[in-house]
Structure formats: structure tokens, C-alpha cells
């Protein structure tokens, strides 16, 4: 088989990991777990989907937490309606990521179609700006999702702005059930959590999501580590007996929930303290990242596998928050063109063939980061070099196959796509 076809076969074999976890336990599937809906406490139903939603039966009305991604909401609503036909009183949106908020319109419409009143939509006041940002950045969002999640999502649905907004905290009562709705920040600037003390059910949105915290995402806008850690601690103090996260399996038991939330907080504080310490010593980004040592119990925590977030992403996110994007290397403030660096490196190596050979040697020695960097310089320096593109594609294909972290894997697969399109260009 031609290299180009091997690469295409690899790309065709990519599956969406959400819900695709045959043979793994719930805990091993972690962030990607999607299962049948569960009655997690009397009259409280947790519905699994690309992002989960929770329906609280409160006497003759419902409290809804989160609304799924738009195209999944109708099927979740159909399942929810098998459980209860009561009117939805309120919908609380934990944050303005599309997997949690875009289906809101479907929940509102379902109520109206049944002849019920329009439900209140409750959110932090920052959701408004977040929705405006979502609309402004739709092209970027769809391109990024293709890189991150490996699939195309064309979105047509309408966003729904909240009609009940709050700043710090809000308490609402529906019949005999109360809901504490608290600003958490962290994962996004509009993240909230919802606690129902009567049934001791806590909905944390994505402030905890069965992965190393997704704070410092390389593709996304600024997130807030220390605020996320503080929200985790405040949630841990609620004495919840059921924790419904935005992704991954429901967690039961007061002790287990406290331990999970405190562990996630410690994970963030560890990196926050390290980066702040480095910045105050005048260390540059590279040295800050390279001297980060994560305690083994955190790296091996079942709740925090680095499959979406990653300690390096978190460290870089914190660094950028406080110190901007300057790497600390003066030559990189106004850097030369990447292709020009590539041409110089390839010339120093003695031309494309010695460079190809060196990439091969580095790969054989297990120095994959160096091999990829050199290969990237080569294709930039010599973009019509067929062998260079084949090597580049195969290198990143192998790297993707071994990669545990979804965002890194998505990035390596983007390199494979680039190799395929250039090989197609060169082969005519
Ligand atoms: Zn989410």
C-alpha cells in the first residue's frame, strides 16, 4: 500500500471516543463514559450524553440542569419524557460551552409544545458574553472541534440567553426543593454549580469532569485554575451524597465525593503554586514547564487521567494568564519565518536527504519530539519534497497511535491530514 493510502486508512479509522468504551469499566472510560440514564436519588434523573443533563422532579414541576448539545437534546428529552411529563419550571445552564447549552432551545420548545409556560433559563451573567463570543467565533469553533474531537459539527441551532442572571450566588425554591446555584468560574468565566440539599445531589458542570482539569486548553481562550480549585473546595464542603459531573460517570458516597473534589483541587493548586513560584523567580516558560513535577498519586488518580486536560497545558495556561505569551527568548519576540528557520536548518544539515536520515535516526532512538520538530522544519523548507511529506505523515501517525491525550492526538492527526493533502497535491 502507498504511504498516502496508509495515512488515509489511519484517518478513516478514527472514531469519536465518547461512549465508545467497550471492555472498559465506567471508571476506566472516565471522561468518555456514556451509559443508560440513572435515578441517582429519589426523583432525580441523570441523563448521559455528549455532555450530561440532570432532571429534578420537584412536586408538580421540574428543575433541569444543563441542556446537552443541540443535536443530542431531542433524544435526551425523549428519554426524559418517558420518566416524567411534568412542566419544566427552570433550566440552569452550568456554562456556555455548546455541549451544555446549545440544546436549551429544545427544552424550552418542548415545554411550549405541551402547553406549559416558557421555563426560566438561569445562568451566570457572563453567559451572555460567552454566547456572543460563540456566535462571533463559530468558524474557529468548528475548525477547532475538528482538530480536538475529530469530527465535523455544523451547528444551526439558536442559542438561548438566560432570563434569570446572577453574579455570585442564587437560591431558588421549587415546591419543597431548594437549589443553591453558585458561581464557580475556572473552567469558563461563566461556570456555575448547582446543589439540591434536600436530596444531597450536586451538579458540578465541567468544574470536575473525570480528566486532568481542562484548564489551559491549547486551543481555547483563557481559563482559571485557582478559581476552579476554590470552587472544587466549596463544593466538597456541601456534604453531597451524589455528584453528577458534566462528563463521566456519576459518583456516589460522601467520602468518595469529598476525596474526588479535594484531589482535583490539589491537582490545580500544585501546578498553580509551581508556576507562580517560577514566575516570581524570573523563570521563562520552558524552564517553568520542564521543572514541573507532579506527585505520583495525582498523576495516577482514577479521577484525573490526562486524557483531555494535561499538566503541561495547565501550566502553560497559568503562565499565559499572569505573564502573557512571551516565551522569554528574545529571538522569539519577533521571530523569523518558520520556513526560513527550516531552510537554514536543512542547509546546515547538508540538504534534505541528510535531514531525512537524521529524522529517521532520532525516531529510532525514541526522540520523537526532536524527530517531529526536524521533520516539520524539513517540510516547511522543502514543501515539494514527496519523501519529506511521507516521513512527516508516518511520524505523526505513529505518534497519534501511541498518544493517550485526546487534544495531543487530535493535533498529531492534523499533521497526518496535512501530509495526505500535500501528497495528493504532489501526486496530482
Ligand atoms: Zn462539557
Image (cartoon, grey):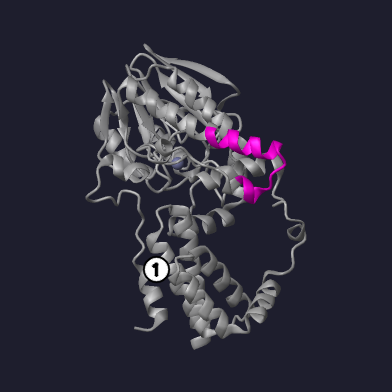
Q: Secondary structure at mark 1?
A: helix
* Residue name at image x 26 percent, y 32 percent: 38
* Residue name at image x 42 percent, y 80 percent: 4
Quadrant in which residue 3 is drawn? bottom left
Image quadrant holding the N terminus, namely: bottom left
Q: Which residue is mark 1?
A: 11
Residue 44, horizontal then vertical, whole percent: 30, 25
Q: Nearer the viewer, residue 351 or 95?
A: 351
Q: Nearer the viewer, residue 63 or 170?
A: 170
Q: Nearer the viewer, residue 133 or 317?
A: 317
Q: Is residue 260 visible?
A: yes
Neighbour class for label 1 at 10 Å: few (<14), some, many (≥20)?
Answer: some
Residue 267, horizontal then vertical, whole percent: 48, 34
Q: Up-down: is 221 above or below 262?
A: below
Q: Residue furthest bottom?
A: 428
| Label tally | 1
Q: Nearer the viewer, residue 268 or 297?
A: 297
Q: Up-down: is 233 above or below 405?
A: above
Position of 7 with respect to 427 (left or right) is left
Range of magenta residues: 270-288
Instruction: Indicate yes or no whether the magenta region holds residue 350.
Output: no
* Residue name at image x 35 percent, y 46 percent: 32
Residue 250, horizontal then vertical, whole percent: 32, 32
Quadrant in which residue 200 is drawn? top left
Q: Residue furthest left?
A: 23
Amino acid at each position: 500500500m502507498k504511504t498516502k493510502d496508509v495515512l488515509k486508512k489511519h484517518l478513516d479509522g478514527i472514531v469519536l471516543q465518547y461512549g465508545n468504551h467497550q471492555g472498559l469499566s465506567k471508571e476506566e472510560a472516565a471522561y468518555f463514559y456514556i451509559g443508560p440514564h440513572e435515578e441517582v436519588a429519589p426523583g432525580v434523573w441523570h441523563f448521559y450524553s455528549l455532555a450530561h443533563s440532570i432532571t429534578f422532579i420537584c412536586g408538580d414541576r421540574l428543575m433541569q440542569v444543563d441542556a446537552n448539545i443541540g443535536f443530542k437534546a431531542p433524544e435526551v428529552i425523549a428519554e426524559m419524557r418517558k420518566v416524567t411529563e411534568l412542566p419544566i419550571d427552570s433550566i440552569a445552564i452550568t456554562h456556555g460551552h455548546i455541549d451544555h447549552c446549545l440544546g436549551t432551545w429544545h427544552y424550552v420548545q418542548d415545554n411550549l409544545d405541551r402547553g406549559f409556560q416558557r421555563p426560566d433559563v438561569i445562568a451566570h451573567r457572563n453567559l451572555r458574553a460567552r454566547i456572543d463570543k460563540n456566535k462571533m467565533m463559530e468558524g474557529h469553533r468548528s475548525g477547532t472541534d475538528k482538530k480536538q474531537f475529530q469530527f465535523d459539527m455544523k451547528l444551526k441551532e439558536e442559542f438561548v440567553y438566560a432570563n434569570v442572571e446572577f453574579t455570585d450566588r442564587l437560591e431558588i425554591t421549587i415546591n419543597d426543593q431548594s437549589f443553591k446555584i453558585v458561581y464557580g468560574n475556572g473552567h469558563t468565566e461563566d461556570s456555575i454549580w448547582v446543589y439540591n440539599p434536600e436530596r444531597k445531589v450536586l451538579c458540578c458542570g465541567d468544574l470536575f469532569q473525570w480528566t486532568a482539569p481542562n484548564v489551559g486548553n491549547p486551543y481555547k481562550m483563557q481559563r482559571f485554575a485557582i478559581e476552579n480549585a476554590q470552587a472544587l473546595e466549596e463544593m466538597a464542603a456541601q456534604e453531597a451524597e451524589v455528584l453528577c459531573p458534566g462528563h463521566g460517570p456519576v459518583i456516589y458516597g460522601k467520602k468518595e465525593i469529598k476525596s474526588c473534589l479535594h484531589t482535583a483541587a490539589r491537582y490545580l493548586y500544585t501546578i498553580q503554586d509551581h508556576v507562580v513560584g517560577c514566575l516570581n523567580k524570573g523563570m521563562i516558560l520552558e524552564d517553568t514547564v520542564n521543572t514541573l513535577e507532579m506527585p505520583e498519586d495525582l498523576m495516577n488518580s482514577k479521577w484525573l487521567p490526562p486524557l483531555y486536560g494535561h499538566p503541561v497545558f495547565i501550566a502553560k495556561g497559568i503562565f499565559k494568564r499572569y505573564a502573557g505569551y512571551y516565551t522569554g527568548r528574545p529571538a522569539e519576540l519577533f521571530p523569523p519565518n518558520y520556513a526560513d528557520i527550516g531552510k537554514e536548518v536543512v542547509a546546515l544539515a547538508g540538504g534534505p536527504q541528510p535531514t531525512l536520515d537524521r529524522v529517521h535516526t532520532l525516531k529510532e532512538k525514541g526522540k520523537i519530539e526532536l524527530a517531529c520538530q526536524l521533520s516539520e522544519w524539513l517540510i516547511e523548507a522543502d514543501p515539494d519534497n514527496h519523501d519529506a511529506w511521507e516521513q512527516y505523515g508516518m511520524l505523526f501517525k505513529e505518534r497519534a497511535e501511541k498518544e493517550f491525550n485526546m487534544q495531543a492526538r487530535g493535533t498529531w492527526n492534523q499533521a497526518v491530514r496535512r501530509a495526505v493533502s500535500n501528497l495528493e497535491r504532489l501526486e496530482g
